[in-house]
Image (tube, helix red, strand yellow):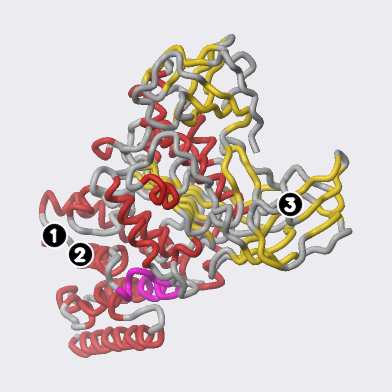
């Protein structure tokens, strides 16, 4: 609950878009939430000079005029954490959009206040402790079935430690009812199912851990070539139309994180509408349940107030940290951080701050760091392991990766999936360029891959070497054509095309190929690299490349990604044996001919 520290004389003296200056604010704190005007527009103090405060308003300030009252709350901008978050859709300041629609219709009314979580719904409460035991911060008091996929753990708040004097018996309770009482050194503390937490303050942990497990996404170019670790940070930069949003949708749908937080900050309304319509209909591939049963959506589209866009990523990361504290792996997808940075630029201009590169505020690197550094694999206060993985889309104008947001983002992430306009125009999706992308997690997750598929490390290195050689050879081909190259080099070009068409491309509409399990990824890559290894040896002994390429199995190898599903590994193994048999027959035939 917020503390009312009403100052009667506090009033608006100047309005500049979402930035409002108010007098009579002596004693106001930085990032304190205030209510502006007769409608009570939600705002946040971002600067204090004497008794004049600069307020960033998260709602439309049309018709707001000097003299309008300002009411302080005495608390920072916070989110409500508890049962009911999963499956919900919020705006940037955690207003539930479904609840807002029921009350005001399609458009959000200014000053409208709806509780973030349903205060009337009763949740099935199952106590995990008995009265009389000592409890510590982050410890689970009870479990609540939040959805078919998530059993919500009710945690002791980070600032509470003491003896559990009383805990509610098994039953159904609302989020506002007292479910436990703890005797602390400062007195008895009543606990409910919910906590409030300031969005700009990271939730506490015990320690950071090394990233050792990959976040499996089912996308071959990512999992095999440029893996992201659980608790890692990644960026997807690309120009208009290269597939940033679609790639993030695929990752949100198929990644093996236990909780998904999807933040649409500043994107077009139709793209966010697609997410809101698709996700409730999708089935979780891991459990066979609706995907929304482990997903939270935050929608702050380009036509919503720009100030709310700025805070939306903090709202999303705070919700993610809350589920991380329950010992879960969480994946956060922010689409896009460029639109968020544009909000920073607009607000900085209204605040009359000195601009830096391309008009962005000088604090841009710090703000990016504050966001990405809240990811990581951690040990929680209760001693469990949890993680928050962050994937941020970047929209550089004209696809120019040298612009400030992309460059500063690269300082704070360790996985870079560079989308290429030429690949997108050629209908090569995902359009992640294999030479401009990188992952610093490959060595850290190699031990996991060694357990799942010991060949992964060697196959990956060999395939990357082929693609790099092909890029150099293409420069020669553009000058003199491919016919002048020896067969050994033309084999590189041939196998590189097989890698691009038969491995790196992946259709989001192919029922068998939209998600590729790790073992099938390695099997498909091994199939192509077997052709390269054996073909190279045969060509070195004098076999003609033209006849090797003419083998019927070659076209089938490219189509294997859509012919064999994840549950058809035996059939894929049989096909691999047939390909090897065809290569054996070709080798025997050529040896006999010699």
Q: Earlier in the sequence, mark 1 or mark 3?
A: 3
For the residue pair 63 and 579, the one nearer the viewer reads as 63
Q: Position of residue 256 (x, y in %)?
A: 49, 64
Q: Considering the numbered disc 1 on the image, is that residue within a helix, a strand or a loop? A: helix
Say which element carries label 3.
Answer: loop
Mark found first going from the N terminus, 2 or 1: 1
Q: Tell me the quadrant of the picture where the N terminus can be found.
A: top right
Q: Which mark is residue 156?
A: 3
State whether residue 443 appears in this view. Answer: no
Magenta span has 524?
Answer: yes
Q: Please check the rendered image and state whether residue 248 is part of the magenta-colored stretch, yes or no.
A: no
Q: Residue at x 54, y 35 (%)?
A: 370
Label 1 CA crowd tier, 10 Å (few <14, some 14–19, many 20+): some
Whole-angstrom CA distance, mark 2 to mark 1, is 7 Å
The number of callouts visible is 3
At which x and y percent is residue 434?
Answer: 33, 54
Residue designated by label 2 = 490
State which tag comes first along the sequence, 2 or 3. 3
Please name whichever residue, 335 or 268, is drawn nearer the observer in this view of the structure.
268
Report the residue marked by disc 1.
Answer: 482
Q: Which marked residue is nearer to the observer: mark 1 or mark 3? A: 3
Q: Is residue 466 left or right of residue 133?
A: left
Q: Residue at x 54, y 62 (%)?
A: 258
Mark yes or no: residue 446 visible.
yes
Q: Which residues are magenta?
A: 511-526
**Where is residue 536 drawn, in percent x and y?**
29, 71
Contact? badges 2 and 1 (CB < 8 Å):
yes
Q: Quadrant of the C terminus?
A: bottom left
Q: Residue furthest top?
A: 50
């Amino acid at each position: 609950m917020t503390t009312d520290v009403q100052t009667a004389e506090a009033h608006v003296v100047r309005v500049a878009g979402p930035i409002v200056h108010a007098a009579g604010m002596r004693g106001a704190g930085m990032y304190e939430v205030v209510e502006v005007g007769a409608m009570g527009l939600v705002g946040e103090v971002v600067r204090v000079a004497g008794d004049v405060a600069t307020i960033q308003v998260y709602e439309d300030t049309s018709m707001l005029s000097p003299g309008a009252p300002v009411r302080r709350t005495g608390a920072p901008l916070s989110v409500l954490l508890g049962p009911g978050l999963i499956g919900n859709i919020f705006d940037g300041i955690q207003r539930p959009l479904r609840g807002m629609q029921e009350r005001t219709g399609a458009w959000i009314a200014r000053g409208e206040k709806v509780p973030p979580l349903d205060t009337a719904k009763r949740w099935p409460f199952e106590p995990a402790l008995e009265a009389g035991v000592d409890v510590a911060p982050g410890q689970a008091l009870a479990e609540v079935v939040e959805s078919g996929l998530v059993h919500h753990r009710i945690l002791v708040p980070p600032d509470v430690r003491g003896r559990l004097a009383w805990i509610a018996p098994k039953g159904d309770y609302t989020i506002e009812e007292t479910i436990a009482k703890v005797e602390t050194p400062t007195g008895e503390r009543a606990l409910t199912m919910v906590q409030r937490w300031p969005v700009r303050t990271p939730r506490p942990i015990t320690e950071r851990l090394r990233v050792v497990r990959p976040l499996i996404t089912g996308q071959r170019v990512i999992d095999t070539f440029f893996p992201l670790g659980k608790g890692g940070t990644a960026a997807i930069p690309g120009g208009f139309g290269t597939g940033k949003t679609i790639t993030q949708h695929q990752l949100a749908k198929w990644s093996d994180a236990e909780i998904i937080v999807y933040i649409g900050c500043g994107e077009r309304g139709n793209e966010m509408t697609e997410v809101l319509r698709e996700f409730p209909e999708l089935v979780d591939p891991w459990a066979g349940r609706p995907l929304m049963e482990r997903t939270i959506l935050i929608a702050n589209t380009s036509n919503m107030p720009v100030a709310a866009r700025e805070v939306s990523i903090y709202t999303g990361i705070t919700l993610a940290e809350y589920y991380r504290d329950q010992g879960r792996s969480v994946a956060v997808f922010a689409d896009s951080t460029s639109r968020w940075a544009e909000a920073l630029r607009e607000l900085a201009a209204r605040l009359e701050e000195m601009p830096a590169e391309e008009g962005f505020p000088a604090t841009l690197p710090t703000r990016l760091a504050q966001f990405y550094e809240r990811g990581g694999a951690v040990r929680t206060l209760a001693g469990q392991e949890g993680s928050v993985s962050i994937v941020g889309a970047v929209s550089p104008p004209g696809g120019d990766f040298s612009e400030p947001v992309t460059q500063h983002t690269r300082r704070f992430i360790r996985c870079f999936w560079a989308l290429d306009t030429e690949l997108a125009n050629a209908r090569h999706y995902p359009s992640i360029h294999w030479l401009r992308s990188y992952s610093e997690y490959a060595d850290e997750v190699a031990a996991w891959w060694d357990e799942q598929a010991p060949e992964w490390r060697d196959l990956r290195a060999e395939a990357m070497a082929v693609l790099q050689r092909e890029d150099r050879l293409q420069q020669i081909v553009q000058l003199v054509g491919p016919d002048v190259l020896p067969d050994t080099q033309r084999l590189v070009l041939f196998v590189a095309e097989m890698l691009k068409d038969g491995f790196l491309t992946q259709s989001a509409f192919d029922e068998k190929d939209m998600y590729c399990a790790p073992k099938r990824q390695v099997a498909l890559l091994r199939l192509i690299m077997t052709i390269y290894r054996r073909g190279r040896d045969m060509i070195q002994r004098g076999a003609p490349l033209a006849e090797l390429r003419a083998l019927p199995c070659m076209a089938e190898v490219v189509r294997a990604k859509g012919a064999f599903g994840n549950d058809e590994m035996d059939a894929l193994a049989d096909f691999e044996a047939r390909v090897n048999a065809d290569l054996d027959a070709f080798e025997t035939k050529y040896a006999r001919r010699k």
